[in-house]
Amino acid sequence: MKSGCKQKAFTLLEVLVALAILTMGLGTVIKVAGGQAAQLAYLKNKTIALWVANNKANEIQLANWPGTGTSSGHELMANQEWRWKVKVSNTADKDLRRLDIEVNQADTEGEPVIRFIAFTGKRSDKNEKK
């Protein structure tokens, strides 16, 4: 061996410091990934609830002139059971009704996943003779 060459190695302290830094970095990555997964589930539920509310508003708008009052029911969408509640109320215009729609997952209580407001107008019969 040559006498002027020394091999340099990591000390135990340097290895422990590197592992501590790596652990903190990986912990942060895992925390961020978990937060993103939770946010994705939240947005998925909001989107599906919006579809349920939109469908209900379209059903009412395509049906006959709705009476005022509250109705509720269940609907299956995206392999989940959703509970909806519709409140139909008058507006300042006698030919326009307001639809307040709340949608929640069927197995949960409390605040709805989404609140949706739509309007429907009184349709005139096109076949009606004047």
Image: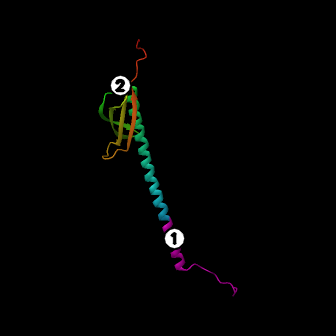
Q: Nearer the viewer, residue 105 or 54?
A: 54
Q: Is residue 39 above or below residue 126?
A: below
Disc 1 or 2, which lies upstream in sequence? 1
> In the rendered image, is residue 78 in sight?
no
Residue 94 placement (x, y as % from top left): 35, 26
- Camera-side residue of 5 and 71: 71
What is the quadrant of the N terminus in the image? bottom right
Quadrant of the snapshot with the C terminus: top left
Q: Position of residue 104 (x, y in %)?
A: 35, 42
- Asked whether residue 40 appears in the rendered view, the answer is yes
Identify the residue position indicated by label 2 in the image: 65
- The amino acid type, in three-letter code, at marker 2 is Trp
Magenta segment includes 90: no
- Cα separation between marks 1 and 2: 66 Å
- Is mark 1 in CB contact (under 8 Å) with mark 2? no
Let me know if residue 22 is in the magenta part: yes
Which of the pair 125/12 is nearer the observer?
125
Above or below for 122 versus 127: below
Mark number for residue 102? none
Q: Quadrant of residue 113?
A: top left
Q: Give the label, 1 or 2, closer to the camera.
A: 2
40 left or right, relative to 65: right
**Residue 7, quarter of picture:** bottom right
Which of the 4 quarters of the picture holds residue 92?
top left
Where in the figure is residue 58, as x and y percent of width and height? Answer: 41, 31
Q: Residue at x 33, y 35 (%)?
A: 86
Up-down: is 15 above or below 89? Answer: below
Residue flagged by tag 1: what amino acid is it? Ile
Write down the residue under mark 1.
Answer: 21
Q: What segment is highlighted magenta in the picture?
A: 1-25
